[in-house]
Image (tube, rainbow, N blue to C red):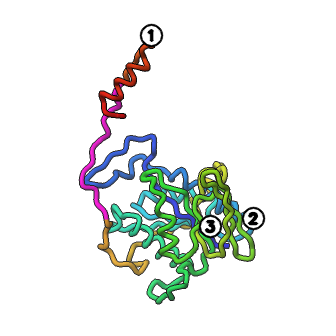
Amino acid sequence: MKIVVCIKHVPDVQSDRRMEDGFLVRGEEDVLNELDENAVEAAVSLVEELGGEVVTLTMGPEDAEDGLRRALQMGADSGVLVSDESLAGADVVATARTLAAAIARIGGVDPASPREEDQAATGDVDLVITGMASLDSMTSMLPGALAAALGVPALTLASALEASDDGEVLVTRATGTLREVLAAPTPALVSVTDQANEPRYPNFAAMRAAKKKPVDTWDLAELGLEAGAGPAIAVVDSEARPAREAGIIRTDAGEAGRDLAAWLVDNKLV
């Protein structure tokens, strides 16, 4: 089984994040997106069970390779970084289009060859796995957009993932009070939640081995894509969130309920 795991190198959620010229500043305290560790673990576990290979894929500046190296430490076999200046600030549509082209190339598909409308663009890639969201934007839109760009079924927000030798994936997910079990033929795309598994912590031997694993860097031209499309959205303005003000403390002497009701009315909250 050949699996591509899409990951993202994001600013550490514990760091002070800021915008400059309409872009989120990257490259200072960036880490592998925590929710993508579950995707890497799911892929590596499947290959350990069924055999095959795991290719990690990311899009970003040069230092995004650090995220790939972390995934390689966790057991992935190789990595691909798509890096191109024209991709700065790419939205979900541009990102999905670019990752789909990269997955096609990983799967041995010639980007110049025409594709039938009902034909998946994954080549010999059997499964694409992503995390449920990236912690820099938390939109959860990419998995569905990427599946649409590839022309494959999307099984999203999986809390459990299984695959079989006969080319089928099975996922379990919770929606409100319901528990759903969904199946799809491969090739398919699955996004996993942080409930899907417990990501392994790489030991020293795995860290050393990761340094020898191959990482390729591609630009848009190598994917058969034209530069300059740009994002469909732009940040017009941004400012730091104001510090949270201290709350009002009332000592209840029997009138706190009335005071609260009056405060809600005065502030037009009811």
Q: Which residue is mark 2?
A: 49
Q: Secondary structure at mark 1?
A: loop
Q: Which mark is residue 54?
A: 3
**Residue 243 location (% of width, % of height):** 33, 32
> Are discs 2 and 1 less than 8 Å apart at CB?
no
Amino acid type, callout 1:
Ala
Q: Is residue 270 visible?
A: yes
Q: Which label lies toward us, 2 or 1? A: 1
| Disc 1 from disc 3: Cα separation | 65 Å
Mark 1: few, some, or many residues within 10 Å (few <14, many ≥20)?
Answer: few
Q: Residue at x 45, y 40 (%)?
A: 14
The quarter of the picture where the N terminus appears is bottom right
The quarter of the picture where the C terminus appears is top left
Sequence order check, earlier mark of 1 and 3: 3
Q: Which residue is mark 1?
A: 253
Magenta region: which residues?
233-246
Residue 130 located within the stretch drawn in magenta? no
Vertically, is 226 above or below 204? below
| Disc 2 from disc 1: Cα separation | 65 Å
Amino acid type, callout 3:
Val
Q: Residue at x 44, y 87 (%)?
A: 112
- Magenta residues, dominant SS class: loop
